[in-house]
Amino acid sequence: MSYQKSDLGAVLENPRVSGLSIKQAIGDKSTPTPSDQDFVDTPDYAEFKKQMFKKSGINLNLYKQPQMHRRLLGMVERANKKNFIEYFQMVDTDEKEYAAFLDRMTINVSELFRNPEKWVEMREKILKPMLEKKSSLKIWSAGCSYGAEPYTLAILLEQLSPGRKHTLHASDLDQKILAKAKEGKFSDADVKNIDAATLAKNFIKLEPSAGSFPAGFGAVHQVKPEIRAKVSFRAHNLLADAFESDYDLICCRNVVIYFTDDAKDILYGRFCKALNPGGVLFVGGTERIFDARAKGFESLIPFFYERIS
């Protein structure tokens, strides 16, 4: 069972976005930043949200409005457009600009084993007990960005259960980012939390070819084909698309911080339904779930929540 697009329409937060100047909205230090209570919608912004939903399926009303408005105003300014209508006309007719819009809309993190202490807990307190009970796990990395998280999971699973076959889904809204994720290429900084033996076993070290990577990128560490083959990437909109079910583990870290409280509640409810009883949801360090039991979860350790049977 899962919520469909029509279910989300009932939980829209009242827009409170102002018609401030662009400099005010993106945080010009010479101008006091207004409180969220001061924000009201404007006709061009409302029309932009409406048209973008039709084009992309992204419902911008499900994001915290003041923050989203400021971010989008920054995009309008960088594009040298007078208002949101002109900006939409540009992204609607220019595929490169539309791809750039989607890229800026997402928070893309590429560091493997980010927050190493949490991955120690994942290995010892979550995955090990699960693998003692089940020979095969079904896992979803939701909002996977460049693939650091699902590849981290694939490495851990291979360490703990060599040769076993697991289902490991990874999804993101951004097709451009997914294409990069499938390549599995990371910088020196991205693999800084990986010890030398693990790095050598799971990655191929390449030298960046001229023009392929930004200056200062350093060596390229590409996930070996046998590890990349363990991850199935797909495009998915968390706020609109249907969820699969019977997951043992869902990881969704640093994704929902810009969503409205109502959108978060629906999303956590959908995650709960997508998990098996006893399945675990792993969230980011700023995304503690308050009143977890009311949402169908029990806190195991900080930022790991088990679905109540």
Image (cartoon, grey):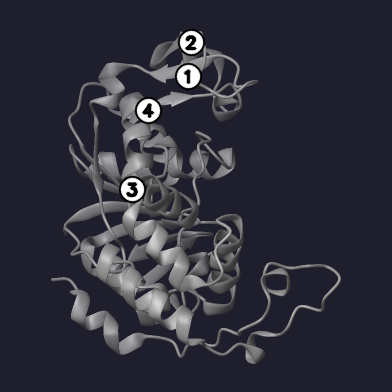
Q: Please tell me which residue lies in front, 122 or 81.
A: 81
For the residue labelled by badge 2, is the local secondary structure a helix, a strand or a loop?
A: loop
The answer to whether any part of residue 17 appears in the image is: yes
* Relative vertical location of residue 143 with respect to residue 160 in this rendering, above or below: below
For the residue labelled by badge 1, is the local secondary structure a helix, a strand or a loop?
A: loop
Q: Residues within 10 Å of mark 1 (few under 14, many from 20)?
A: few
The residue labelled by disc 2 is 209
- Earlier residue among tags 1 and 3: 3
Query: Disc 4 vs disc 2: which is toward the camera?
Result: 2
Q: Is residue 266 left or right of residue 138?
A: right
Quadrant of the rendered image containing residue 62: bottom left
Q: Residues within 10 Å of mark 2 (few under 14, many from 20)?
A: few
Q: Please tell me which residue lies in front, 54 or 8.
A: 54
CB under 8 Å between discs 1 and 3:
no
Label 1 to label 4: alpha-carbon separation: 26 Å
The three-letter amino acid code for the residue at tag 1 is Ser
The three-letter amino acid code for the residue at tag 3 is Glu
The three-letter amino acid code for the residue at tag 2 is Ser
- Earlier residue among tags 1 and 4: 4
- Earlier residue among tags 4 and 2: 4
Q: Residues within 10 Å of mark 4 (few under 14, many from 20)?
A: many
- Earlier residue among tags 4 and 3: 3
Q: Residue at x 19, y 27 (%)?
A: 164
x and y, in percent, of residue 229 in the image: 23, 25
* Relative vertical location of residue 194 with respect to residue 98 in this rendering, above or below: above
x and y, in percent, of residue 248 in the image: 25, 52
The residue labelled by disc 4 is 155
Q: Residues within 10 Å of mark 3 (few under 14, many from 20)?
A: few
CB under 8 Å between discs 3 and 2:
no
Label 4 to label 3: alpha-carbon separation: 35 Å
CB under 8 Å between discs 1 and 2:
yes
Residue 95, numbered label: 3
